Image (cartoon, coloured by chain):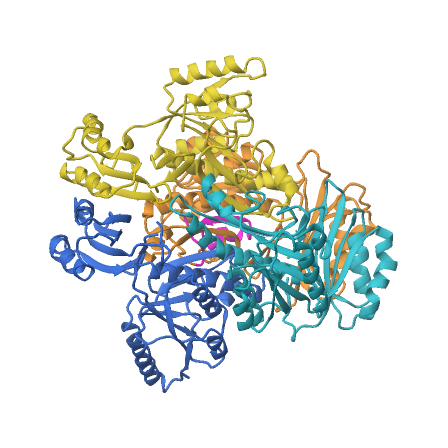
Chain colours: A cyan, B orange, C yellow, D blue
Amino acid sequence: MRLPSPDSASPSAILLIHCPDSKGIIATVSEFIAKNNGNITFLDQHVDAGKSVFFMRIEWELRDFAIPEEKIGEFFDVLIARRYNMNWQLHFSREMPRMAIFVSRLPHCLFDILSRWKSREIEVAIPLIISNHPEMEAVACQFGVEFAHFEINSTNKRDQEQAQLDLLARHEVDFIVLARYMQILSEEFVSHYPNRIINIHHSFLPAFPGAKPYHHAYERGVKVIGATSHYVTAELDGGPIIAQDTIRVTHEDSIDDLIRKGRDLEKVILARAIWHHLQRQVLVYQNRTLVFS
Amino acid sequence: MRLPSPDSASPSAILLIHCPDSKGIIATVSEFIAKNNGNITFLDQHVDAGKSVFFMRIEWELRDFAIPEEKIGEFFDVLIARRYNMNWQLHFSREMPRMAIFVSRLPHCLFDILSRWKSREIEVAIPLIISNHPEMEAVACQFGVEFAHFEINSTNKRDQEQAQLDLLARHEVDFIVLARYMQILSEEFVSHYPNRIINIHHSFLPAFPGAKPYHHAYERGVKVIGATSHYVTAELDGGPIIAQDTIRVTHEDSIDDLIRKGRDLEKVILARAIWHHLQRQVLVYQNRTLVFS
Amino acid sequence: MRLPSPDSASPSAILLIHCPDSKGIIATVSEFIAKNNGNITFLDQHVDAGKSVFFMRIEWELRDFAIPEEKIGEFFDVLIARRYNMNWQLHFSREMPRMAIFVSRLPHCLFDILSRWKSREIEVAIPLIISNHPEMEAVACQFGVEFAHFEINSTNKRDQEQAQLDLLARHEVDFIVLARYMQILSEEFVSHYPNRIINIHHSFLPAFPGAKPYHHAYERGVKVIGATSHYVTAELDGGPIIAQDTIRVTHEDSIDDLIRKGRDLEKVILARAIWHHLQRQVLVYQNRTLVFS
Amino acid sequence: MRLPSPDSASPSAILLIHCPDSKGIIATVSEFIAKNNGNITFLDQHVDAGKSVFFMRIEWELRDFAIPEEKIGEFFDVLIARRYNMNWQLHFSREMPRMAIFVSRLPHCLFDILSRWKSREIEVAIPLIISNHPEMEAVACQFGVEFAHFEINSTNKRDQEQAQLDLLARHEVDFIVLARYMQILSEEFVSHYPNRIINIHHSFLPAFPGAKPYHHAYERGVKVIGATSHYVTAELDGGPIIAQDTIRVTHEDSIDDLIRKGRDLEKVILARAIWHHLQRQVLVYQNRTLVFS
């Protein structure tokens, strides 16, 4: 799969689809694009044989495409989606999503994301950094991003979350990245951004959910540690996993060593999840992800 | 991708295609299958943008398919392949390929392949094991496979290779696996099995081709060692790579340790290549492979 | 660390020690060996700073060592161990341990261990294979190892385990490897072989203990699967971990694919644990292992 | 091995030793420390059996150590090193080395190092960033580090390198990190910082040395790509390797994908090498490293 750099590349449309499996879906969809003079640059499909569900990601160049951008969704829905009872999303590569970062006191993921953004590794707008602590303001400032501090305690949480939601809305934020944000978001908050809040958890879930996973990993004497990025749902550390990896450790590694080695993994795995999300490669179905990459 | 177990699964057809890139190929091919009542169970495609070449692997169930098996190739060629100037291969999942194993004195890959075969992890016929040394006869015998010993020296090599080719032909061997066979096959020999001889080389090629790669790796002080499985071509250790992986080592590892740790990698990487080959997932183009899995 | 091949190498002694941390332990132990003309070929130590415990593995050549083999333990105990309140084990490289394999119906780990044994990758005696099913008798027979079938049900478990223990005792078995043995051993049985029963579990523990971990991994939508070898304790899949690793998977992998890919990991991780155990590299302390390698 | 955080930890001394192998070295060195009331917190040794060379890294707490810091080297040399013909280095954990970064146009390694430094992941002074291009001045400025631009061409190289050396001397730089610096340093330059210039090369050396390794990797069709950090010597990409790792890629990855995926590896592997160097864990012997960690 090639994802062209924004200037050189022709803009493209991306369809993510799932529906009951049946014969002829690929032919029908690809013919719809071909007949209207679209050039398919990516097609990947998957069938969940047990559940009889069909999944597809298809991307095509918009140059010379017969249907105008703003009409594609309508035409696709009427001509195809209804027939197959499809659940579908349509995206355009030229849209630049707006991302907010939530952070607490640990800077490594924040630094990493902002560095990738400044280097234009990721094409995204970052209008806002939110924290429950004041320490990261200097980093936000260093990279020229607005910083908002919301102190959270047991009595003000509901109000503070509402204030955060208002601020996010004002900045027209599309999705949120929790870059080691050490506060559990309420179910109510999460419901505003379904499959649009990406968390990094510092263990190979489902092992060691919740607080202090490196300490628990040390106590259990595991020989690998891991990191997991996932969409946030109402269940703590239970949302659909986007990316995940592990590294080997030994008895010589103290808890501090696990924390140190884990940081590199957290940065890479969170960045990988952000990348997949931005490329519209992720499809969520029944608390699992399909990542078409 | 699901590869069904042989009894439960409906037989399927597999097409591997490459051709000059153009609009509409996916639509045309998938429509050909759909219109004839085939159910596509796998489709993956790739475009080499630099070279403007289109590649695809597509698999569909033969049950209820309107075109009889023996006619599919002809119909596809006339109706589609010629129009797009396609290079294509057609396979059927119910064919069971016949594989010969070449081995010298090291038993680990041989044991591993035969164990997978006996356990029915791989569905293949193994009519023959060939060696330039007598030691592995006991292993062949233990697994009930015919063993042929061909002593090779500088004067008899040409004749012995001819005798091997005759024996292979008599056993109707489709492809050959070199399971640590420490003899260079002549260009002439190789030409009889193009992209049908799989070798395992005990380094991460292109580093350390030729003899004694673990010794060279030790001398160079690398921190990873690797294994590479590839199709054999006239160029020593220069053929298209099918599978490859590495593991980390340290200064504490002696050459013997590298050899010991490398063995596990060799077994796994060779088995992975055999698996891809048997599933018809490998397409060779200009000395590189595409592995659709 | 070099582990010499059995013929070329001089025999060596191996000490595994743990004790309360204090100054001078390394100096005292290494001087004990040096003064008696032993050549240290391996020394690795570790301090658990939190618990203030010192751990060490030290190996030296016995050639020219002033103290006769059968007296080393006594001398070390009187001269050193008591002073530091040490917990210690002494082993000799020329001892060849006796290992029994327990297996159920899946052959891959059994084949792998027997192949390594036949190839002399591991120096061990294998007098006995025990199974709760009859299927693996053919494999045992193929490798020339005695096979004993013990059908287990809810009423006969206690008696059958006693019969197994008797048989193990008769064969003077030192330790047991559970090569995908699908029966939970009773606490009573386990108590006869403390830290001497090695299990392979097909997940990255502590995730997915118990039955059907690949199914649970699939349901949870993880992006890595793993395997864990550990010593068996009374707690199911809760014993000290010896070796562990993971591989990445994707949404394309069905449960059958996870099972297939996991097999290779299980073989390698179980073999790695057996290797460490045989080299006397493993020290267990408070349900965690130190692996000096 | 525990590397204590700077405030909580007692300062320690670190000895790196190599010498002809003989009996009693460990006993002698550890007794020297113990008798003078030093508490050993780390000891790791290695014997190159083929070359009969002994290597050791030993670290002990200076609190209560009987010999004053400035005399330890002299005492060790007279009492021990001469007797065993040792090559040795002595370091103190409280020394904070001074590091210069050389960079060209690619920001990812530079951002990563500076972020780790700002986050106090690495304890080092960074007085200076040198570049052959002006672009990275903004990043240097953002992190508050002096930036010096030296345009290099075929006629001025010798003079510019001399000017760089002068500047480095003025800043009392101990070692240099080439964070994707796309200029070959002259042998003369390198001779001023033997084993004190760390480079990151974007391939798994010795494969693909020199320019454009990702392009060569793509052309060769490898299934893994890698990154290698090494000390710079007169031979291009031929110096002793400190750290190295690989990741798997597929035929779907374009050269741009390899570059993108490789960046993460480069960052981690370079950071790992810097870490080992700063902890005085690296010993170079005959163009290979021992990394005691």
Magenta stretch? B183-206
Q: Is residue B163 visible?
A: no
Residue C9 placement, left or right of A277: left
* Residue lying at the far bottom of the rendered structure: D155
User: Magenta segment: does it hold B186?
Assistant: yes
Examine the image and state in which quarter residue B289 appears: bottom right
**Front-most of residues A116 and A55:** A116
Q: Which of B229 and C61 is in front in this view?
A: C61
Pick the front one: A149 or B21: A149
From the viewer's perspective, is D86 left or right of C1? left
Coordinates of residue A64 in the picture (x, y in percent): 78, 73
The structure residue drawn at horizontal position 55% and vertical position 59%, both measured from the top left corner, is A104
Question: Which residue corresponds to the image point at 29% horizontal and 56% vertical from the top-left?
Answer: D11
Q: Quadrant of residue C271?
A: top left
x and y, in percent, of residue A252 in the image: 37, 46
Q: Pinpoint residue D143: horizontal percent, then vertical percent.
A: 47, 73
Residue in the picture at 69% in, 58% down: A159
Rendered view: D157 above or below C217: below
Residue C10: give x, y in percent of width and height. 22, 36
Q: Is residue B241 visible?
A: yes
